[in-house]
Image (cartoon, rainbow, N blue to C red):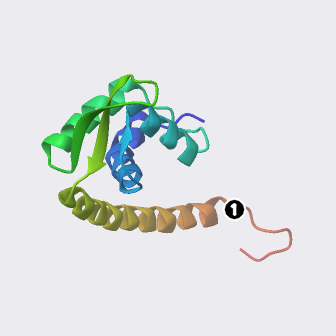
Amino acid sequence: MKVSKDLMAASSAPLVLAILAEGESYGYAIVRRVRELSDGEIEWTDGLLYPLLHRLEDAGHVESRWGQSDTGRRRRYYRLTAAGTAEITEQRRQWAAVAAALESAWDGVRQAITPLAPGAAP
């Protein structure tokens, strides 16, 4: 299954914020964590992640620092700010409302397309 670009774009910021709520991380580890959380259904590219991280940083939700990996390679690490923590709370509220609306709509679809059992009254 391929997740649509629209859905991926809408869910990317909340996913990154939630991952960074687990602790400081860097680009490749964030991409790997998204893949883990989605059981491999969501595959991000650098072209999606880094502009998003820059937007989150510009908004004050994330801050970054340069550090070194275990191998000595320079790496940029990202962490959540207090404003980012508040944004997660708001994102969760909004996504809960969307998820509830979708569940209600899908229940209606399920009922509309579920064939009647043999012998059941219409």
The quadrant holding residue 76 is top left
Image position, residue 117 (x, y; %):
81, 69
Give the tally of numbered discs. Answer: 1
Q: Which one is in front, 36 or 70?
A: 70
- The answer to whether residue 67 is above or below residue 11 is above
- The answer to whether residue 8 is above or below residue 107 is above
In what quadrant of the picture does the C terminus appear? bottom right
The quadrant holding residue 55 is top left
**Amino acid type, residue under disc 1 in the picture:** Thr
**Residue placed at 25% from the left, 30% from the top?**
51
Q: Which one is in front, 1 or 35?
A: 35
Which residue, as the protein is rendered here, is positioned at the far bottom? 121
In what quadrant of the picture does the N terminus appear? top right
Q: Which one is in front, 39 or 64?
A: 64
Image position, residue 88 (x, y; %):
30, 60
**Residue placed at 42% from the left, 26% from the top?**
45
